[in-house]
Amino acid sequence: MKALFFLYDGYVDWEISPLSYMLSVSDIDVKTVALTEEITHEGKFRIKPDFRIEECDPTHYDVLIIPGGTPAPLDKEERLLNFIRRFDEQGKYIAAICGAPTFLAAAGILRERKYSTSIDEPEYQHYFDETFKSEADVTISENVITAEGNAYIEFGIAVGKELKIFDDREDELETILFFKNQLRS
């Protein structure tokens, strides 16, 4: 199985760190893609993604994961929106947290799907149909997984469950306890 993280300037790194760790210790091949050769995340580290978006074929991946951050100006970036659409057309998983569901809405893939997001700024509301906004921290609707920004552990667990990375329920619970710092001997 292969996972692809879309990274962009200003993405919120901690929202995907638990998930990227969970995937890296499982049998999932993890790669990164961006619009540019180098990006800087919210924590100010410079990152060199594995691929530029033009070099990446969605058919080679099982899931696209997008961290949160400020949607503008990428909410109008057709290369990204078309990339997201290609994942959805193939029925592949798309996981987005915090502000990233704005990209899914701008790409038109939320349609009549339930979703979670932390975005409430007026300039992005025209992308969303509020009647489908979920009250849940994490929402799974068909192949789309969305989450509130502060639910990054729950988001990671939900994506992990969909990708079947846990051996069983005990493995899943142990992972939750690990990230909540509740594993004590």
Image (cartoon, grey):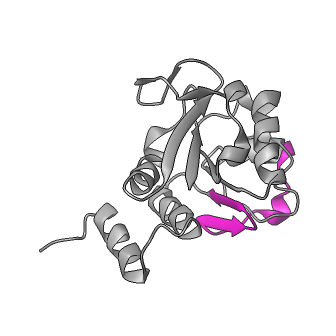
Please tell me whether residue 139 belongs to the stretch shown in magenta. yes
Which residue is pictured at 68% across the width and 33% down the height? Answer: 56
Instruction: Find residue 127 and report its image quarter.
Output: top right
Looking at the picture, does residue 69 appear above or below residue 117?
above
Which quadrant of the figure contains the N terminus? Answer: bottom right
Residue 120 can be seen in this image? no
From the top left corner, tell me how far across and down residue 5 is, in percent.
57, 41
Instruction: Find residue 4 and report its image quarter.
Output: top right
Nearer-the-camera pick, 79 or 125: 79
Return the residue found at the far bottom. Answer: 169
Which quadrant of the figure contains the C terminus? Answer: bottom left
In this picture, which residue range is highlighted in magenta? Answer: 125-146
Nearer-the-camera pick, 4 or 117: 4
Nearer-the-camera pick, 12 or 171: 171
Instruction: Find residue 70 and report its image quarter.
Output: top right
Which residue is pictured at 76% across the width and 38% down the height? Answer: 83
- Relative to residue 101, is residue 3 drawn left or right? left
Please tell me whether residue 182 belongs to the stretch shown in magenta. no
Which residue is pictured at 49% across the width and 59% down the height? Answer: 156
From the top left corner, tell me how far across and down residue 71 is, in percent.
68, 34
From the top left corner, tell me how far across and down residue 171 is, in percent.
37, 75
Return the residue found at the far left. Answer: 185
